[in-house]
Image (tube, coloured by chain):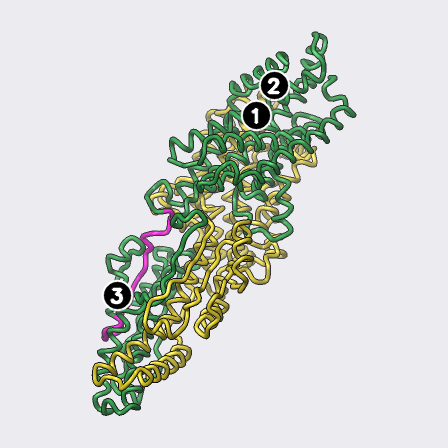
Chain colours: A green, B yellow
C-alpha cells in the first residue's frame, strides 16, 4: 500500500512540474472559461447577456403621433442600455449603414403611418402602411431584439385601435352615443388603452424554480464545470501516456527489478492519475470561485462529485491506455476523445440541443453525468440530489476499470 | 523547387502516417459543425416542450392553450398535475404551467388571476418558455382589457340596469375584440440587408464557417510543434550539413501545411454545401482569397510560435489551447454580435476574427471579392508580421 502511495505521489509531482501538461490541465480550461465569461458579458457587467447597446437607425417619415411615439420608445430610458438609436432622414444612407455592418437594423416609419392606423375619415380608410425593418443578417440575435420591440409597439397600437373601435360600436349599437360623437370618444379610449396595453395585470404569471427561488441564469455556472470536466479527460489520457512512455523508455522494466509487483506499479500509476485529476478539478473550482465569484454549492457534495467524476474519467483513461500502442497514439486519441466527449457531454452546448439518440449516447461520457451533478449543486442541491450522477460515474469507472484490467492482463502492459 | 516539394511531401507523409490525423483533419470538424449547427436531425418540432396543467377546463383556458399551440417558441402538452410534477422533478421538462381552477372569463371580470409557472433553474429553455407564456398572456389579456374598457366607457355615460345587462355588454365587447384582434392587419415588413439573393439567414452557415476556421487554425498553429519536434530530435541540425537554405526549409514546411489546410477547407466546404446546404458557392473568387489569406495568417502564427516554444509537447498543448481560445473569441463558436462592445473591439487583434468576418460577409452579407478585400488585407498583414518575427527568430538549434 505504501508503495502504491509513493508511486502515485511521484507521478503527481512529475505532472505538476510539467509545464506543457499544466497548460492543458489548468491554463486552457481557465482561459476558455474566462473567454466564455467575456463573450456572455458575465464578467464585464452585472448582466448575464452580451446583447446591449444595439445600434439601430430610425427613419421617421410619419408626421403623426404614432411615428413619434415609436421614436420616443427607442430613445426612452427604459431601452437606454439595450439599444443605441440614431435618427436619420435618408433611408438610403440608413440602409447603407446596415449593409456596411455599422448598424443592426433600420426602422423606417412611412409617411402617413398614423393616418393608416387611425384614419381621420373611418368610412374611407387608406391602404395599410407597414413599418419596414431592414436588418443586418450577420447580427440575427440583435435584429431579433429590434423586431420584438417594434412588434410590441405595434401590438399596443393595435390594442388601442381595437379598443376605440369596440367601445364605439357597442356604444352606438346600444344607443348610448350618436355617430357624430364617435371620433372623439374613440381617440380618448384608444390612447388610454394603448398606453396601458401589456401592463394589464388581470392575468399574472407567478414564476418560481423548484426550490422556490426566482429564476436567474448564470452562464458560467454551466460553462466552468463543462470546461473543467472536458480537460479532466486530457489529464487522464496524459496519465495513461506516462505509463506507456515509461514502458517505451525502459523505466517500467527497471522498477520491476525492485521488490515491487506489477499490480503495485499499475495500482500506483492509477492512483497517480486519480490524484492528479482530483487536484486539477479542485484547483479549477477554487480558481473559478475566487476569480469569477462562482458558487459551486455544498462543498462536501462538490468534493464527492469531483471524486466520482475523476473515477469515471480515469476509467476512460485506462481503457485508452490499454488499447493504444504508443504514447503518441494515446496523446492524439486522448485529445480527440476529450473534444468528442466535450461536445457530446454538454461542455460546449447544452445536451438538450442534441437529438434524442445522441443525448442518450452521451451518457457514456463522464461530462454528461458530472455536469448534471455540478449544475444541481450550483443551484442549491445537496448530496442526496446528486446520487444518480454519482452512481452513474462510479458504475462507469468500475466497468471501464474491469475491461481495462482484462486488457492489461492480456497485453501484459504492466510487465514491461 | 524540388527541395521545397520534397520537404512538403515528407511533412505530409509524416502527418498522415497515423490514422489518428484523420480525426482532426475531417472527422472532428464535421462532428462539431453538425452539432453546433443544429444539423443533427433535430426533431421536426424544435419548440421548447412546456407541460400545461389545466385545472380550469374553461373556454378561457382553452383559448390560452390554443394561443400557446400557435406560439413559435413553445410546444404545449396538456397533462395531469401528477404527471407534470413527476416529469419536472426528473428534470425531463424545462417548465410547467399550472392554470388554476378559477381561470374563467367570469372571474376575470371581477378579479385578477394568478397562473403558476415552475421552471428548472439556470435553464435557458425555461426562460424561453416564460417569455412565450408572457407574450400569450398579454395577447389573451388584451381582448379582456378591451372588453373592460368598453364596459367602463358605457358606464361613464349611463349605469347598467343590472348585472345581467352589464355581463351581456361585456360578452359582446369581448367577442368583437377577439374578432378584430384576430383580423388585425400586418403592420411590419421585414427585409434582410446586404444580400442580392434575399436568402434567409442560416445559423448553419455560422457553424460551417466557424468550425472550418477552428479546425484549420489548430493544425496550422501546430506548425510550431513540427519545428519543435525537429529541433528536439536534432534533424534540423542535420539539415545544416546539407546544401539547404533556411528559406528553402521554411518555405517547404510552411507551404506544405498551407496546401493541406486548403485541401481540408475545400473538403469541409464540400461537406457544408452537400450536407448542411450552406451557400458557399456564391462568390468563389472572394472565398478563395479569404481561405488563402486565413491559412497564411494561421501558418505564420504557428511559425512564430515555433520559435518561442522549447518542446514539442509544450507546442502541442499551446496550439490546441490558443486555437480554441482564438476561435472562441474570434466569433467562430458563437456570433460576435453576442459579445459586449468592448470585447468586440478587443478581439480585432485576432486573425480568427477577421477570417470569420470575411467568411460571414461572403455567406450572409452578400459581399463580393471587392467587399472582403479589407479583411483579406488585414489577414495578409497578420501573416507578414508573424512571418517576419518567426523567420527572424528561427534557429536550427
Disc 2 crowd rating (10 Å Cα; few below 14, some 14-19, many 20+) is few
Disc 3 crowd rating (10 Å Cα; few below 14, some 14-19, many 20+) is some
**Residue position for label 2:** B234
Residue A238 visible within the image: yes
Question: Which secondary structure lies at badge 2?
Answer: loop
Residue furthest to the front in view is B162
Give the Cα distance between marks 3 and 2. 70 Å
Q: Identify which residue, A390 or A80, lies in the foreground.
A: A390
- Chain identity of mark 3: A
**Residue position for label 1:** B313
Q: Report if the CB atoms under discs 3 and 2 are less than 8 Å apart.
A: no
Residue A359 place in picture, x, y as percent: 61, 48
Q: Which residues are magenta?
A: A48-67
Residue furthest to the top in view is A258
Question: Which secondary structure lies at badge 1?
Answer: helix
Disc 1 crowd rating (10 Å Cα; few below 14, some 14-19, many 20+) is some
Q: Identify which residue, A252 or B365, lies in the foreground.
A: A252
Residue at 46 percent of width and 60 percent of height? B97
Res A50 label: none
Give the Cα distance between marks 1 and 2. 16 Å
Residue at 50 percent of width and 60 percent of height? B50
Quarter the C terminus of chain A occupies: top right
Of discs 1 and 2, which sits in the foreground? 1
Residue at 31 percent of width and 67 percent of height? A200
Q: Is residue A49 magenta?
A: yes
Amino acid at each position: 500500500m505504501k508503495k502504491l502511495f509513493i508511486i502515485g505521489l511521484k507521478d503527481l509531482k512529475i505532472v505538476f512540474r510539467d509545464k506543457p501538461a499544466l497548460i492543458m490541465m489548468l491554463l486552457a480550461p481557465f482561459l476558455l472559461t474566462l473567454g466564455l465569461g467575456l463573450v456572455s458579458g458575465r464578467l464585464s457587467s452585472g448582466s448575464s447577456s452580451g446583447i446591449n447597446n444595439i445600434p439601430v437607425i430610425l427613419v421617421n417619415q410619419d408626421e403623426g403621433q404614432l411615428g413619434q411615439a415609436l421614436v420616443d420608445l427607442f430613445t426612452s430610458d427604459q431601452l437606454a442600455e439595450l439599444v443605441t438609436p440614431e435618427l436619420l432622414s435618408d433611408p438610403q444612407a440608413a440602409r447603407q449603414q446596415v449593409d456596411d455592418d455599422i448598424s443592426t437594423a433600420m426602422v423606417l416609419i412611412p409617411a402617413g403611418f398614423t393616418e393608416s392606423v387611425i384614419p381621420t375619415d373611418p368610412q374611407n380608410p387608406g391602404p395599410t402602411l407597414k413599418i419596414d425593418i431592414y436588418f443586418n443578417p450577420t447580427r440575427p440575435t440583435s435584429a431579433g431584439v429590434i423586431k420584438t420591440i417594434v412588434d410590441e409597439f405595434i401590438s399596443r397600437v393595435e390594442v388601442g385601435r381595437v379598443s376605440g373601435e369596440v367601445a364605439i360600436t357597442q356604444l352606438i349599437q346600444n344607443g348610448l352615443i350618436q355617430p357624430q360623437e364617435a371620433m372623439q370618444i374613440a381617440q380618448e379610449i384608444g390612447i388610454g388603452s394603448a398606453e396601458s396595453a401589456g401592463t394589464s395585470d388581470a392575468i399574472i404569471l407567478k414564476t418560481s424554480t423548484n426550490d422556490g427561488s426566482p429564476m436567474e441564469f448564470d452562464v458560467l455556472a454551466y460553462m466552468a464545470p463543462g470546461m473543467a470536466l472536458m480537460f479532466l479527460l486530457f489529464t487522464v489520457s496524459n496519465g495513461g501516456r506516462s505509463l506507456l512512455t515509461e514502458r517505451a523508455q525502459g523505466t517500467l522494466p527497471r522498477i520491476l527489478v525492485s521488490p515491487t509487483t506489477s499490480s503495485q506499479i499499475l495500482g500506483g500509476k492509477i492512483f497517480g492519475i486519480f490524484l492528479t485529476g482530483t487536484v486539477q478539478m479542485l484547483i479549477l473550482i477554487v480558481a473559478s470561485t475566487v476569480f469569477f465569484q462562482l458558487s459551486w454549492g455544498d462543498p462536501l457534495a462538490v468534493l464527492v462529485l469531483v471524486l466520482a467524476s475523476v473515477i469515471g474519467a480515469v476509467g476512460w483513461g485506462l481503457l485508452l491506455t490499454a488499447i493504444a500502442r504508443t504514447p503518441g497514439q494515446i496523446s492524439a486519441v486522448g485529445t480527440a476523445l476529450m473534444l468528442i466527449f466535450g461536445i457530446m457531454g454538454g461542455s460546449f452546448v447544452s445536451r438538450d440541443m442534441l437529438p434524442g439518440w445522441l443525448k442518450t449516447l452521451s451518457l457514456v461520457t463522464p461530462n454528461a453525468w458530472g455536469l448534471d451533478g455540478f449544475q444541481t449543486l450550483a443551484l442549491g442541491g445537496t448530496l442526496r440530489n446528486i446520487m444518480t450522477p454519482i452512481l452513474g460515474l462510479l458504475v462507469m469507472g468500475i466497468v471501464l476499470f474491469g475491461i481495462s484490467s482484462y486488457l492489461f492482463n492480456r497485453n501484459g502492459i504492466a510487465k514491461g | 523547387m524540388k527541395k521545397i516539394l520534397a520537404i512538403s511531401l515528407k511533412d505530409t507523409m509524416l502527418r498522415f502516417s497515423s490514422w489518428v490525423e484523420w480525426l482532426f483533419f475531417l472527422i472532428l470538424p464535421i462532428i462539431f459543425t453538425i452539432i453546433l449547427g443544429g444539423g443533427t436531425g433535430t426533431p421536426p418540432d424544435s419548440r421548447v416542450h412546456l407541460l400545461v396543467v389545466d385545472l380550469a377546463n374553461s373556454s378561457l383556458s382553452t383559448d390560452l392553450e390554443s394561443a400557446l399551440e400557435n406560439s413559435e417558441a413553445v410546444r404545449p402538452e396538456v397533462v395531469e398535475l401528477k404527471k407534470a410534477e413527476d416529469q419536472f422533478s426528473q428534470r425531463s421538462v424545462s417548465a410547467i404551467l399550472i392554470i388554476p381552477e378559477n381561470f374563467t372569463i367570469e372571474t376575470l371580470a371581477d378579479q385578477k388571476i394568478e397562473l403558476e409557472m415552475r421552471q428548472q433553474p439556470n435553464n435557458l429553455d425555461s426562460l424561453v418558455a416564460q417569455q412565450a407564456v408572457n407574450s400569450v398572456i398579454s395577447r389573451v389579456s388584451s381582448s379582456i382589457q378591451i372588453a373592460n374598457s368598453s364596459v367602463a366607457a358605457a358606464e361613464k355615460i349611463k349605469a347598467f340596469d343590472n348585472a345581467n345587462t352589464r355581463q351581456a355588454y361585456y360578452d359582446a365587447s369581448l367577442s368583437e375584440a377577439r374578432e378584430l384582434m384576430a383580423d388585425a392587419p400586418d403592420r411590419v415588413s421585414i427585409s434582410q440587408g446586404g444580400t442580392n439573393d434575399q436568402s434567409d439567414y442560416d445559423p448553419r452557415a455560422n457553424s460551417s464557417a466557424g468550425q472550418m476556421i477552428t479546425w484549420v487554425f489548430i493544425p496550422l498553429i501546430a506548425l510550431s510543434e513540427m519545428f519543435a519536434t525537429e529541433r528536439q530530435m536534432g534533424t534540423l541540425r542535420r539539415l545544416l550539413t546539407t546544401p539547404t537554405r533556411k528559406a528553402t526549409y521554411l518555405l517547404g514546411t510552411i507551404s506544405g501545411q498551407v496546401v493541406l489546410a486548403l485541401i481540408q477547407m475545400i473538403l469541409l466546404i464540400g461537406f457544408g454545401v452537400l450536407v448542411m446546404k450552406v451557400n458557399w458557392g456564391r462568390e468563389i473568387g472572394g472565398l478563395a482569397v479569404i481561405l488563402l489569406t486565413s491559412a497564411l495568417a494561421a501558418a505564420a502564427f504557428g511559425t512564430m510560435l515555433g520559435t518561442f516554444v522549447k518542446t514539442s509537447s509544450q507546442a502541442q498543448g499551446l496550439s490546441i489551447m490558443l486555437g480554441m481560445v482564438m476561435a472562441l473569441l474570434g466569433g467562430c463558436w458563437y456570433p460576435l454580435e453576442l459579445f459586449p462592445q468592448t470585447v468586440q473591439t478587443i478581439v480585432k487583434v485576432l486573425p480568427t476574427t477577421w477570417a470569420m468576418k470575411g467568411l460571414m460577409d461572403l455567406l450572409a452579407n452578400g459581399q463580393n471579392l471587392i467587399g472582403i478585400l479589407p479583411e483579406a488585407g488585414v489577414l495578409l498583414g497578420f501573416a507578414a508580421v508573424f512571418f517576419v518575427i518567426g523567420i527572424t527568430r528561427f534557429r536550427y538549434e
